[in-house]
Amino acid sequence: MKTTTFLTYVGEQCGKAEEAINFYTSIFPNSEIKSIIKYQEGEAGGTPDLIKYGVFTLNDTEYMVSESNFDHPWSFTPGVSLFVECKSEIEIQTLFEKLYSNGGQIMVPLDNYEGSGDYGFGKKYGWCEDKYGISWQLNLSE
């Protein structure tokens, strides 16, 4: 058995999935877009410019992606986020800044635990949402 995170871009995020995965694979090491299948003309759920089904990896972890132009009553929520274990100060700082920049938002500032409380994860922690609506928790555990 295998579990994989599946990201579905709907509503105002529909049409941004390919841009998002290109961005993600450019900032995470050992990452690639494995496949992208677009909707056929007239196919329900999308148009030929939208991703029907795609697979990509971030640091060798596989993710699946799709877009739908149906009027879904849901979208991404910070209640479910991607948790990233970073190995250095430079790595956590760089990733955090890239992820929230250009229209994202900081949910928990990237900070050392000293003075801000210990979340129990490691030495430094931050939580942000990128401009595509995906929520990211970054942690420096060493």
Image (spheres, rainbow, N blue to C red):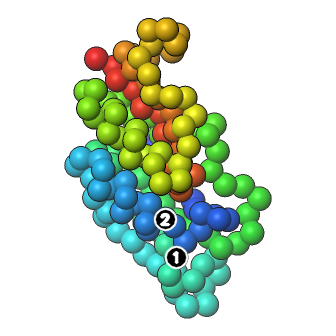
Residue 86 in the image: state x and y as whole percent.
31, 30
* Residue 96 picture quarter: top left
Q: Is residue 90 shown left or right of residue 120?
A: left
Quadrant of the image containing the N terminus: top left
Q: At 36% across and 63% down in the image, what residue appears?
A: 22
Amino acid type, residue under disc 2 in the picture: Ala
**Mark 1 residue crowding within 10 angstroms, few (<14) / some (14–19) / many (20+):** many
Disc nearer the start of the sequence (1/2): 2
Amino acid type, residue under disc 1 in the picture: Leu
* Camera-nearest residue between 30 and 130: 130
Disc 2 element: helix
- Image vertical order of residue 91 relative to residue 113, above or below: below
Quadrant of the image containing the C terminus: top left
Mark 1 highlights which residue? 50
Q: At 75% across and 69% down in the image, what residue appears?
A: 71
Instruction: Return the mark for residue 103.
Output: none
Q: Is residue 4 visible?
A: no
Q: Is residue 33 shown left or right of residue 72?
A: left
Instruction: Return the mark for residue 17.
Output: 2
Residue found farthest to the bottom? 41
Residue 68 in the image: state x and y as whole percent.
62, 70
- Image vertical order of residue 86 relative to residue 67, above or below: above
* Camera-nearest residue between 42 and 102: 102
